Every structure is written in C-alpha cells, then in structure tokens.
Image: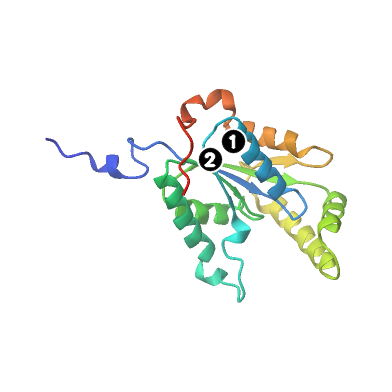
C-alpha cells in the first residue's frame, strides 16, 4: 500500500478542512464582548459549529506574564483541544487582535494557517465614555477612558486596510452581530455542511 502524501498529514494539507478565525478588535467601550457573545448565540441557534475565546482572559495575571507569550501559548493549547473535537471556526475577541503583528502571532499560535476575517468595532469618544461609565466605577473610570481614547487612535492609524470597520454607535448588538457573521461568510444559508450531525461532545 502506498504511503500517504506528507501534506495529507499536515493540519493545513489538502485532506484537512481549512480553519477560520473571526477576530473582533476595538477600543474599550465598542462592545466587543457583547458582540462576541451575540455572535456565539446566533451561530449556535443556526447550528453552526464554532468556539469563542476571549483573548483578555488568556494572560490575565499578576505579575503580568505577557513577556512570556502566555496568551499565545494558551491559545495554542485551547485551539488544539477544540480542533481535536472537530471545531474549525473560532471567534476571538481582543482589543488589539486586528493589528498586523498581533494577528500574525495569533495565527501562528493556532498553527494551521486559518482564513482570517478581522473586524475593527468602532464608536465615537462620547459613546465609549457613556458605555464605560455604565460598567466602571470610582477612580478607575478616568484611567479606562484615557486608555480607550489612546487605543482608538492607534487602532485607526495602524489597523490594515483589509480590516473591516464596523461602527457600533446607535445600533443593537443583534444587528451588529448579524453583520459580523455575514462579513465572515458564516451565514447559516452557506454553512449547512458544517452543522454537527448530533450534539457537540461535552465532558
């Protein structure tokens, strides 16, 4: 019997289904977490297999472990576990995920050259401040507002042209999430073949 071709054994070889990553970035106050959860809800309702990862939680520790690349290492471990269970799509939320150097690091950590859809959620300074005031209290509010303003300028200036900009001002989370799913090409009508035949295995 002939030996299988080497590329058939690679995660990105012809025998493997192409994986996809939907990156949601944006300043604090744009609604990344809320939109991410609503994307998850709509995809789940449509029976489309996926997972969701909040990048902020991958290296949230003190002292700060970022210099050790912990977020990327944790993403690699999490994604390997999801892939082993048949998942091929990930929704990843993180402020800077749409910046080229961050996207490169994330896709390298995934290890399977995913097709990437990067979306930058935007809002005005006034909207961001209003939303942050609803969730932050005390002296930290000013710090969060200033950090959000700085990141907004950086993201707008540095995010590549290939990143889709989606304004969130005055729009419902449901509407925004539906638009994000459409931009990723994950609309239910196009993904029938990816629906699990039975319940997703749970431990």
Q: Nearer the viewer, residue 121 or 162?
A: 121
- Look at mark 1 in the image and give the residue it sits on: 44
Q: Residue at x 67, y 55 (%)?
A: 95
Q: Residue at x 73, y 54 (%)?
A: 27
Depth check, mark 1 against mark 2: the one in front is 1
Q: Position of residue 173 (x, y in %)?
A: 75, 39
Q: Is residue 132 left or right of residue 36?
A: right
Q: Residue furthest top?
A: 189
The earlier-in-sequence mark between 1 and 2 is: 1
Q: Position of residue 124 (x, y in %)?
A: 83, 48
Q: Is residue 2 left or right of residue 177?
A: left
Marks 1 & 2, CB-CB < 8 Å contact: yes
Q: Which mark is residue 50?
A: 2
Quadrant placement of the N terminus: top left
Residue 175 occupies which quadrant of the picture?
A: top right
Q: Nearer the viewer, residue 6 or 36?
A: 36
Q: Nearer the viewer, residue 74 or 162?
A: 74
Q: Is residue 132 left or right of residue 53?
A: right
Mark 1 and mark 2: Cα distance apart in space = 8 Å
Q: Residue furthest bottom?
A: 63
Q: How many marks?
A: 2
Q: Position of residue 139 (x, y in %)?
A: 85, 71
């Amino acid at each position: 019997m002939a030996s299988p071709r080497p590329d058939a054994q690679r995660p990105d070889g012809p025998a493997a289904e192409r994986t996809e990553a939907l990156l949601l970035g944006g300043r604090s106050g744009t609604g990344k977490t809320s939109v991410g959860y609503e994307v998850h809800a709509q995809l789940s309702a449509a029976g489309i297999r996926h997972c969701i990862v909040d990048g902020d939680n991958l290296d949230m520790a003190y002292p700060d472990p970022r210099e050790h690349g912990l977020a990327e290492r944790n993403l690699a471990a999490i994604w390997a576990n999801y892939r082993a269970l048949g998942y091929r799509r990930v929704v990843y939320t993180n402020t800077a995920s749409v910046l080229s150097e961050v996207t490169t690091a994330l896709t390298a950590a995934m290890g399977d050259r995913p097709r990437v859809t990067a979306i930058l959620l935007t809002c005005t300074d006034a909207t961001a401040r209003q939303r942050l005031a609803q969730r932050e209290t005390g002296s930290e509010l000013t710090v969060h507002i200033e950090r959000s303003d700085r990141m907004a300028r950086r993201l707008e200036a540095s995010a590549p042209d290939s990143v889709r900009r989606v304004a969130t001002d005055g729009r419902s989370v449901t509407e925004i999430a539906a638009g994000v799913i459409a931009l990723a090409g994950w609309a239910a009508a196009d993904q029938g073949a990816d629906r699990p035949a039975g319940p997703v295995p749970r431990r």
